[in-house]
Image (cartoon, rainbow, N blue to C red):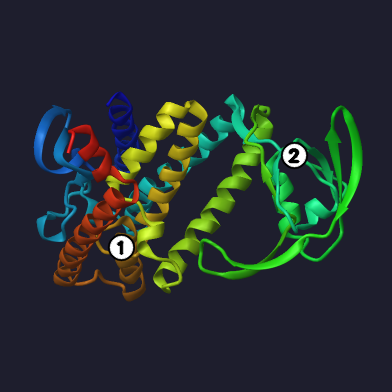
Amino acid sequence: MVSALISVLFLGFLIIVHEYGHFLVARWAGVRVLRFSVGFGPRLLAWKRGQTEYAVSAIPLGGYVKMAGEQRAEGTGKPWEYYAKPVGTRAAIIFAGPFVNYLVAFLSLWLVFVIGYPELLPEVGKVLDDMPAKAAGMRVGDRVRLVGGREVHTWDDLTKVIYESADRPLTLRVERGGTTRDVTVTPQAKEITDPFGRRRTIGLIGVAPSGAFEPFRVTPLAAFGRALRQQGEATVQTLTALWSLLTGRLALRDSVTGPIGLIYLTSEAVRMGWAPLLFLISLLSLSLAIFNLLPIPILDGGHLFFLGLEKLLGRPVSLTIQERSAQVSFVLLIALILIICVNDLNRFGLLKKAAELIGL
């Protein structure tokens, strides 16, 4: 219960920093912010400071910042209104939310590398029969130190080289009983379908990890470079997954998690410690940033799309078109969230766990 509460607070934090990005840039641009709300619908809690009302609302599926003159029909032409600002300024206000989430994702990842994170060691826990490793004489307990002349510190380091070396001989330096020896293996080629629905060929030698972990940490400067690289890779992977989803190569039920699933995963990460929790927060914040930039009318990306059209056409897109498209996308988005929530209940076995808890 405590873990679930902490997870809700962390997810709420990601929403708050997103909206705070809009808020800060709007204030910087001289736009009055009338309301800063965490959640939608009826207000549960509200207070006013200056010209802004701060609120916590009933439906915890996001949040919003309401600015003066945000709707053209409400505008009076005052200089502090949203629509009184140039297209570029309005685009900066909209883009600020996803950008802050992207920064939070980077900072969380940087902290993971600074405070230390558990990594699976390149130690063999199982050797499969009729595979190259068995034929080369590898045994349970072998610790791989070098592969193809490259030093390896983690199981991930080892698998990356092996995957890329199908049908090519590799020399592995292994440590066994305090002594080291070199073994030569030729990874067996296997065609697989990766998580994004793409067919590719990888190399396999037939070993599984022992499950031994060791904490790794790097200097703040090294962590900066590492976080930058890993976030870049995660961004590409997320965009690839979205494209695979849109083209039907990736199933919705296997690739998308909703509010219920996020709370469950965050609760599990809370139990595991700070490093796993910060790593998950980094992934969630990155996903939130990218998702919000999709050109869907109700999302930030949709607003940016309409602003782009306004700049291109030299006039705003019809208010009726914007409102209708927002209404349709809102209904579709809510329907999608409900479908994903039902899928989460089945995927994580939450209905079964709840039934066991109440003795059904």
In the image, 10 versus 30, the foreground residue is: 10
Q: Position of residue 166 (x, y in %)?
A: 76, 64
| Mark 2 crowdedness (10 Å alpha carbons): few <14, some 14-19, many ≥20 | some
Q: Earlier in the sequence, mark 2 or mark 1?
A: 2
Which residue is disc 2 drawn over?
140
- Residue drawn at (47%, 28%) of the image: 272
Count every numbered label the image shows and give the total: 2
Contact, mark 2 vs mark 1 (Cβ under 8 Å): no
Q: What's the residue type where badge 2 is placed?
A: Val
250 in relation to 23, above or below: below
Instruction: Single out the residue that lies furthest toward the left.
Output: 42
Answer whether residue 33 is visible to the viewer in this image: no
Q: Quadrant of the N terminus?
A: top left
In the image, 110 versus 152, the foreground residue is: 152
Q: What's the residue type where badge 1 is placed?
A: Gly
Instruction: Single out the residue that lies furthest toward the front.
Output: 129
On screen, residue 4 versus residue 179, left or right, reads left
In the image, 144 versus 236, the foreground residue is: 144
On screen, residue 163 versus residue 171, left or right, reads left
What is the spatial separation of the Cα atoms under label 2 and label 1, in whole angstroms? 54 Å
- Residue drawn at (15%, 69%) of the image: 324
Which residue is disc 1 drawn over?
302
Q: Secondary structure at mark 1?
A: helix
Residue 25 falls in image quadrant: top left
Q: Position of residue 200 (x, y in %)?
A: 63, 69
